[in-house]
Image (tube, grey):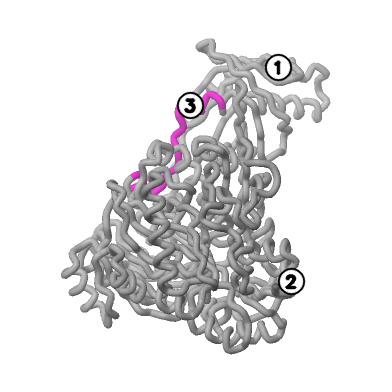
C-alpha cells in the first residue's frame, strides 16, 4: 500500500479524498494555486505544494507543474478527483513514465472511453444502442450547422474531452448551432485544453440514469446500482439520488451487466460510471463513460456502504476486489443536493465573494460500512443520516476562477419519502451568507410534486421554471406555522427588550398578548398564551398552534416544534419583525400590535429604481466581447455581449428593441454585479 498520495485537484473532492486516505493511514499532498493559498484542502493535507497562478490552464491542468509537485513531495500515487486532469491520457502516461501510480483506469481505457467520440464508436461496434449523431471532428461553425441540419434539430453540441456540463450546448436552430459551436469550443479549450467538438441528437424528455462500476486489474468487475441524475440545469446535474425511483430490478440488472461488459471490453480498472439515457418505456441508450470518480458518488456510498475512494486506491495498489456482485445490496435511499455559488434569482448566474457565514447542518453517522464484503457495525437502522462534502469554510473566498459548487449535501433514510424529508430539514438548517447561492431553489425542488412523485425528466427545470426561479409562494398551512412561530419569537424578543430597558417590572404584561402578523401578502390576528414550556398561539378563526423552542433573540437559526412537527427557520432581525427563510421562501414577517397594523396599511410602497434602459452585469465576470456599437439598433433576443465567469461563457441578449446610446465596458474588463455595461436611448 502507498505511504503518500498527491491529490491533483482542489475544493470538496480534494477534501473528500484526504478523508479516506487519512482513514487508511496514508499521507496526503495538496496542490494549490495563488487563489487557493488559504483553501480548506490545503490546510487538511499533510503537505501542500504551490503550482502557479489562479487560472486552471496556468496551474491545475498544467501537467509539468503537477509532475514537479509530485517530484518535490515524493508521492507514490496521484488521485485526480474529477475534472481537471482526471481523464487526461497524457497525464496518466506521464505518471506511468515517472513510476507513479495513477488512482484511476489504464491509459488505454482513458483514451477509448474518456474521449466521447471514440467511446461512441466502440459502443456502436460492441452492439450497444447509442444516440444518433456525428462522431467525426467538426472544423468550423458552418460545418456544425450543416451537420446539425442533417441530424435534425434539436441537437447537443458537446466537447469531446468535456465533463461537468462544460462545453455543452443545446441548439434548436441554425443560429444557436453556430453560436453554440463557438462557445462550446472556447469553454472546452479553457477547461480541458482540448477544443474538439462533436454533435448528437438531443433526445427530448429523457431520464439520465448512470451505473457505477468498480473493476480491478485482475479481471473482476461489479456494478453498484444506479444513480438518477435527471434534474439538471444547462446539462449540469443539480440533484442526484440512488436508487432511481424509475427503474425496476430487471432493468437495473440489464443496465448493470451491460455497463460491466463495456468496462471489461476496454480493460477498465478503478471506479467508473457508464451513463445512459432512458425513455418512458425503460429503453436505455449508452451516452458516455466517465473514467473517473463522479461528483455524485456519495449517494452510491450511502446505499451500498462501499467507500469508492478506498476501493480506487486499493485497485491502484494492485489489490483484487474483495467485494463480489452478490455482496452488493442497495439499502435505503440517498439524495444529494449540490450547493452552488450562484444566484437563482438572477438566472442562476455565478456569485463570488467572502462566505461571511457558512454553517452546514450537523452531520450524522451514515450507518455501517461494507468492508471486504461484510457489513461492519450494526445492521442499517431506521434513522436518517446527513453527510456534507465541502471544500470551503466560514470566512473563505469563493473565487471566480473555478467551478461554483461549494458543497454536496446528502441525506440517507430507509425510504425515499424519509430521505426527502430529511433533506428538507437539512436544507432549512444550512446557513450561507455573503454570496448568492441556490439553497432556496433546492428547497423548492424537494417540495415539487413532480420530484416527490419521482416523475421527472432532464427537462424538469426548463419545464417547471421556464421563466427562471422567482422564489416560493408557501401555502397557507405553512404560513400559519411560520406566523405562529414568529409571533412567539417576537414576544420573547420584546420581553427581553423591556427587561433591558428596566422601565417596568411586569415585562410580559407590557408586551401584551394580541398581535398582528403580516407575511406574503396575508395578515393573521393572533393571541398568545405563554408558559414555561412554550406558547399557545390562537388565530382569529379559532385555530390554535402550540409552539416550543429554545430560540433566543440574536440566534440566526430557530429550531422549533409546532404542534409536534419540526420547523427550522433562518432568522434575521428587521424593523418590526424578521426576515425568515424556509422551504425556498424568503419572507419579510412583520409582527405588530393591532393598532400598529392599522397604520402600516396606510403606508405607501417604495418602488425600486428604473433600470429598464440599462444592461446590467448579472454576475462578477470578465467581458469577452461586445457585439454592438453606439448608435446601433438592436432587436429583441439579439446578442449584446459575452461574459465569462467560473469557466462558463454567458451571452447577454436584448430584452426588447432599442438603440445603443453608450457602452461603458470593453473586452478584458472585469465587472461586478450590477455594473452598467450598455445604456439605451
The kind of secondary structure element at disc 2 is: strand
Instruction: Answer whether labels 1 and 3 touch (C-beta < 8 Å).
Output: no
- To which quarter of the image does residue 454 belong? top left
The tag on residue 430 is none
Residue 665 horizontal/vertical position (percent): 42, 72
Residue found 74% across the figure and 16% down from its top = 531
Which residue is under mark 1?
Answer: 530
Q: Is residue 34 visible?
A: no
Looking at the picture, tell me which residue is in the foreground, 632 or 233. Answer: 233
Residue 321 horizontal/vertical position (percent): 58, 64
Left or right: where 485 falls relative to 226: right
Which residue is under mark 2?
Answer: 27
Secondary structure predominantly adopted by residues drawn in magenta:
loop
Q: Is residue 467 magenta?
A: yes
Q: What stretch of residues is rendered in magenta?
A: 464-481
Q: Earlier in the sequence, mark 1 or mark 3?
A: 1
Estimate the spatial distance between the alpha carbons at disc 2 and disc 3, rounded to whole Å.
Answer: 67 Å
Which residue is under mark 3?
Answer: 602
The kind of secondary structure element at disc 3 is: loop
Looking at the picture, tell me which residue is in the foreground, 229 or 608. Answer: 229
In front: label 1 or label 3 = 1
Q: Earlier in the sequence, mark 2 or mark 1?
A: 2
The kind of secondary structure element at disc 1 is: strand
Residue 477 horizontal/vertical position (percent): 49, 24
Residue found 58% across the figure and 49% down from its top = 302
Residue 616 horizontal/vertical position (percent): 42, 61
Is residue 282 depicted above or below 75 in this figure?
above
Question: The N terminus lies in which quarter of the figure?
Answer: bottom right
In front: label 2 or label 3 = 2
Amino acid at each position: 500500500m502507498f505511504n503518500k498520495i498527491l491529490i491533483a485537484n482542489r475544493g470538496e473532492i480534494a477534501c473528500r479524498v484526504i478523508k479516506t486516505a487519512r482513514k487508511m493511514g496514508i499521507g496526503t499532498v495538496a496542490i494549490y494555486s495563488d487563489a487557493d493559498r488559504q483553501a480548506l484542502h490545503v490546510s487538511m493535507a499533510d503537505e501542500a505544494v504551490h503550482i502557479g497562478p489562479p487560472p486552471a490552464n496556468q496551474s491545475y491542468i498544467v501537467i509539468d507543474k503537477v509532475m514537479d509537485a509530485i517530484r518535490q513531495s515524493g508521492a507514490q500515487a496521484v488521485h485526480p478527483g474529477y475534472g481537471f486532469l482526471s481523464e487526461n491520457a497524457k497525464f496518466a502516461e506521464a505518471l506511468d513514465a515517472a513510476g507513479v501510480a495513477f488512482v484511476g483506469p489504464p491509459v488505454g481505457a482513458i483514451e477509448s472511453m474518456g474521449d466521447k467520440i471514440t467511446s461512441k464508436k466502440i459502443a456502436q461496434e460492441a452492439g450497444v444502442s447509442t444516440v444518433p449523431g456525428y462522431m467525426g471532428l467538426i472544423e468550423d461553425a458552418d460545418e456544425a450547422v450543416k451537420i446539425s441540419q442533417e441530424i435534425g434539430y434539436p441537437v447537443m453540441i458537446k466537447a469531446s474531452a468535456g465533463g461537468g456540463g462544460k462545453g455543452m450546448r443545446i441548439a434548436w436552430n441554425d443560429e444557436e448551432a453556430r453560436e453554440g459551436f463557438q462557445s462550446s469550443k472556447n469553454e472546452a479549450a479553457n477547461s480541458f485544453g482540448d477544443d474538439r467538438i462533436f454533435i448528437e441528437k438531443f433526445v427530448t424528455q429523457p431520464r439520465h440514469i448512470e451505473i457505477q462500476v468498480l473493476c480491478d486489474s485482475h479481471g473482476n468487475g461489479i456494478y453498484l446500482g444506479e444513480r438518477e441524475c435527471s434534474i439538471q440545469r444547462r446539462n449540469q446535474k443539480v440533484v442526484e439520488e440512488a436508487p432511481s425511483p424509475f427503474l425496476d430490478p430487471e432493468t437495473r440488472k440489464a443496465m448493470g451487466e451491460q455497463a460491466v461488459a463495456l468496462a471489461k471490453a476496454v480493460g477498465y480498472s478503478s471506479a467508473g460510471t457508464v451513463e445512459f439515457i432512458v425513455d418512458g418505456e425503460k429503453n436505455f441508450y449508452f451516452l458516455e463513460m466517465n473514467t473517473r470518480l463522479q461528483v455524485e458518488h456519495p449517494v452510491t456510498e450511502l446505499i451500498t456502504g462501499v467507500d469508492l475512494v478506498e476501493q480506487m486506491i486499493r485497485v491502484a495498489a494492485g489489490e483484487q476486489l474483495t467485494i463480489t456482485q452478490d455482496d452488493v445490496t442497495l439499502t435505503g435511499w440517498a439524495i444529494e443536493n449540490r450547493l452552488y455559488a450562484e444566484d437563482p434569482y438572477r438566472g442562476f448566474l455565478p456569485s463570488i465573494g467572502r462566505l461571511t457565514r457558512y454553517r452546514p447542518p450537523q452531520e450524522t453517522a451514515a450507518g455501517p460500512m461494507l468492508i471486504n464484503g461484510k457489513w461492519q457495525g450494526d445492521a442499517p437502522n431506521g434513522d436518517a443520516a446527513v453527510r456534507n462534502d465541502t471544500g470551503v469554510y466560514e470566512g473563505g473566498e469563493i473565487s471566480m476562477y473555478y467551478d461554483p459548487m461549494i458543497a454536496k449535501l446528502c441525506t440517507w433514510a430507509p425510504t425515499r419519502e424519509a430521505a426527502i424529508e430529511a433533506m428538507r430539514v437539512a436544507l432549512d438548517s444550512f446557513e450561507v451568507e455573503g454570496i448568492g447561492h441556490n439553497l432556496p431553489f433546492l428547497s423548492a425542488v424537494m417540495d415539487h410534486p413532480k420530484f416527490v412523485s419521482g416523475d421527472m425528466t432532464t427537462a424538469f427545470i426548463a419545464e417547471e421554471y421556464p421563466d427562471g426561479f422567482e422564489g416560493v409562494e408557501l401555502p397557507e398551512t405553512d404560513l400559519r406555522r411560520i406566523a405562529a412561530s414568529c409571533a412567539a419569537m417576537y414576544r420573547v424578543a420584546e420581553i427581553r427588550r423591556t427587561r433591558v430597558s428596566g422601565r417596568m417590572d411586569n415585562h410580559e404584561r407590557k408586551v401584551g398578548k394580541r398581535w398582528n402578523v403580516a407575511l406574503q401578502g396575508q395578515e393573521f390576528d393572533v393571541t398568545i398564551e405563554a408558559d414555561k414550556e412554550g406558547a399557545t398561539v390562537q388565530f382569529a378563526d379559532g385555530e390554535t398552534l402550540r409552539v416550543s423552542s429554545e430560540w433566543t433573540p440574536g440566534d440566526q437559526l430557530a429550531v422549533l416544534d409546532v404542534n409536534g412537527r419540526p420547523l427550522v427557520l433562518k432568522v434575521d432581525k428587521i424593523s418590526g419583525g424578521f426576515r425568515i427563510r424556509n422551504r425556498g421562501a424568503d419572507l419579510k414577517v412583520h409582527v405588530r400590535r393591532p393598532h400598529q397594523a392599522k397604520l402600516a396599511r396606510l403606508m405607501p410602497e417604495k418602488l425600486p429604481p428604473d433600470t429598464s434602459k440599462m444592461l446590467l452585469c448579472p454576475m462578477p465576470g470578465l467581458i469577452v466581447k461586445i457585439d454592438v456599437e453606439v448608435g446601433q439598433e438592436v432587436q429583441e433576443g439579439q446578442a449584446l455581449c459575452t461574459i465569462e465567469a467560473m469557466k462558463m461563457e454567458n451571452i447577454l441578449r436584448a430584452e426588447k428593441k432599442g438603440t445603443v446610446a453608450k457602452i461603458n465596458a470593453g473586452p478584458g474588463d472585469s465587472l461586478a454585479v450590477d455594473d452598467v455595461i450598455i445604456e439605451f436611448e
